Amino acid sequence: MGVIEQPARIARPEPIIAPDLCDGCGLCVKACPTGALALAGSLAVVTHPAACNYSGYCERICPRQALTRPFQIVVAPNIDRRIE
C-alpha cells in the first residue's frame, strides 16, 4: 500500500465585512467568542483573522447583514480503500 500524501495547508478564509452595509453597532464584536473582531472608528473589522473559529455568531447577529463567511471546498484525492 502506498503512502498517502497530505495536501498542503491552505490559508483559511476570513469573514468579510461590507463597509457600505456596516453601521458600526458593535453587535458582531460582542458576539464573537474569540475576539477576532473589533470596531475601528464606525466600522467593524477583522483584527485577528487567525482567532476566528467560524462559529457564525457575528453573521447571524448582524442586523444589516454586513458580514459573510466564505467557505472553501477542498476535494480529497480519490483513495482506494479496498481491504486486500
Image (cartoon, rainbow, N blue to C red):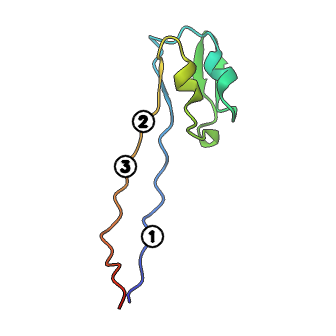
- Tell me the distance, in whole angstroms, between the alpha carbons under discs 2 and 3: 10 Å
Name the kind of residue labelled 3 in the image.
Ile
Position of 2 relative to 58 (above/below): below
Position of 59 relative to 74 (above/below): above
Residue 74 image point, x, y percent: 37, 54
Q: Residue at x 57, y 19 (%)?
A: 61
What is the secondary structure assignment of the residue under circle 3?
Answer: loop
Position of 17 relative to 41 (above/below): below
Could you say which quadrant of the image residue 77 lies in? bottom left
Residue 55 image point, x, y percent: 58, 36
Circle number at residue 63: none
What is the secondary structure assignment of the residue under circle 1?
Answer: loop
Residue bearing mark 1: 6
Name the kind of residue labelled 2 in the image.
Pro
Q: Residue at x 46, y 32 (%)?
A: 69
- Tell me the distance, in whole angstroms, between the alpha carbons under discs 1 and 2: 23 Å
Q: Count residues near mark 1 (Cα–Cα under 10 Å), then give few for <14, some for 14-19, many for 20+.
A: few
Circle number at residue 70: 2
Residue 14 image point, x, y percent: 51, 37
Q: Count residues near mark 2 (Cα–Cα under 10 Å), then give few for <14, some for 14-19, many for 20+.
A: few
Query: Which quadrant is the N terminus positioned in?
Result: bottom left
- Tell me the distance, in whole angstroms, between the alpha carbons under discs 3 and 1: 16 Å
Whichever of labels 3 and 1 marks the residue nearer the N terminus, that label is 1
